[in-house]
Image (cartoon, rainbow, N blue to C red):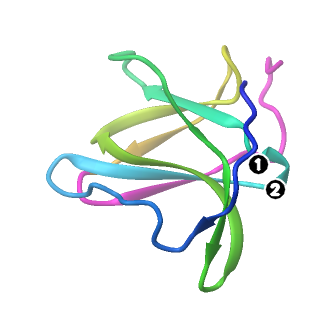
Amino acid sequence: MHQHQLGPSESGSVVLDLGGDSGALVVYTGRELHGREIEISRADGDGPRTHSAVRERHVRDGVFHSAVYPDLAAGLYTVWWDERTPAGAISVTGGAIAEFVWPTSAPAGAT
């Protein structure tokens, strides 16, 4: 996993491309994952993995940490804990924002 030093993201700084067969995914994490890149891939194995860094997000209601995937084709996605271990799966629907909460403990087999 890669780590980055990223500044906070302000409200409205991420543009989501929603509509038709295009949706978005937000993976909510804790502060301890700030800067970590989280990979996702199509659950059917069609296509490569993509990643997004966890950033501190400042919004009207406070501060939270998340990785955002702004333009995804509708379908089922795997969220990866590490290179070999899935953290879970999430369905992305066109025209909508899917939300995934990062697990608080490592799945069996995680490194």
What residue sits 35% from the left and 17% below the top?
47
Q: Residue furthest bottom?
A: 60
Question: Of residues 54 and 90, which is closer to you in this image?
Answer: 54
Looking at this view, is 67 or 89 the one in front? 67
> Toward which corner of the image does residue 3 lie, by quadrant?
top right
Give the residue at mark 2: 31
Which three-letter amino acid code belongs to the residue tagged 2? Arg
Helix, strand or loop status at disc 1: loop
Q: Which span is picked out in magenta?
A: 94-111
Residue kind at label 1, given as amino acid type? His
Circle 2 — which element? Answer: helix
Tag 2–tag 1 contact (CB < 8 Å): yes
At x 73% / y 38%, what residue is drawn?
4
Which SS type dominates the magenta stretch?
A: loop
Quadrant in which the N terminus is drawn: top right
Left or right, residue 79 beside residue 3: left
Quick one: which residue is furthest to the left in this view?
20
Q: CA distance from mark 2 to mark 1?
A: 5 Å
Check the image and report above or below for 16 versus 36.
below
- In terms of depth relative to the viewer, which is nearer, 95 or 32? 32
Disc ID at residue 34: 1
Question: In the displayed structure, would residue 7 be above or below residue 105?
Answer: below
Q: Position of residue 39 (x, y in %)?
A: 57, 30
Give percent across and percent down for residue 52: 55, 39
Q: Residues within 10 Å of mark 2 (few under 14, many from 20)?
A: some
Q: Quadrant of the C terminus?
A: top right
Examine the image and state in which quarter residue 95 appears: bottom left
Give the image location of residue 72, x and y in percent: 33, 41
Residue 13 belongs to magenta span:
no
Q: Position of residue 76 (x, y in %)?
A: 38, 35
Q: Which residue is drawn at the image coordinates 14% and 52% (left, top)? A: 20
